[in-house]
Image (cartoon, helix red, strand yellow):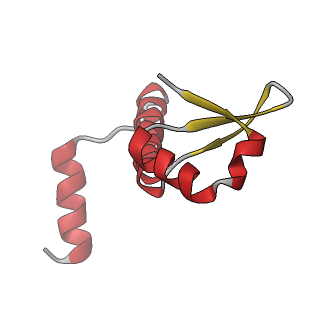
Amino acid sequence: MPQIIPIKDLKNTSEISDMCHKSKEPIYITKNGYGDMVIMSMEIYESAMRRLSVYRDVELSEQQLENGQVRDARTALADMRTKYGL
């Protein structure tokens, strides 16, 4: 379940840091009752960025397939061997 805290609670920095590391998910910060920010531990952030990178790569691959930008694997590998002298 997501944690939601008011912005005034950000004064307690060590408490907030502990919450971020224990929760394993983002903490939502509200201002005047409305969503304002999201904070998370570095580990959770880096994990999310790695996942996002994979999703972007998959999306790019799907676009390349749709546009016909594909090559036979054997031909591509043979070209690379020739190019790099392998």
Residue at 40% across, 48% down: 47
Closer to the camera, 9 or 52? 9
Closer to the camera, 78 or 46? 46
* Residue 35 at least partly seen: yes
41 relative to 80, above or below:
above
Residue 21 picture location, percent across and down: 43, 50
Residue at 24% across, 60% down: 79
Residue 40 picture location, percent across and down: 53, 47
Q: From the viewer's perspective, tell me whether residue 5 is left or right of residue 42.
A: right
Residue 28 picture location, percent across and down: 63, 34
Q: From the viewer's perspective, tell me whether residue 60 is left or right of residue 76.
A: right
Closer to the camera, 28 or 46? 28
Query: In which quadrant of the rendered view does residue 37 lie?
Result: top right
* Residue 54 at least partly seen: no
Query: Looking at the rendering, in which quadrant would you find the C terminus?
Result: bottom left
Closer to the camera, 50 or 2? 2
Residue at 81% across, 24% down: 33
Query: In which quadrant of the rendered view does residue 62 lie?
Result: top left
Query: In which quadrant of the rendered view does residue 51 lie?
Result: top left
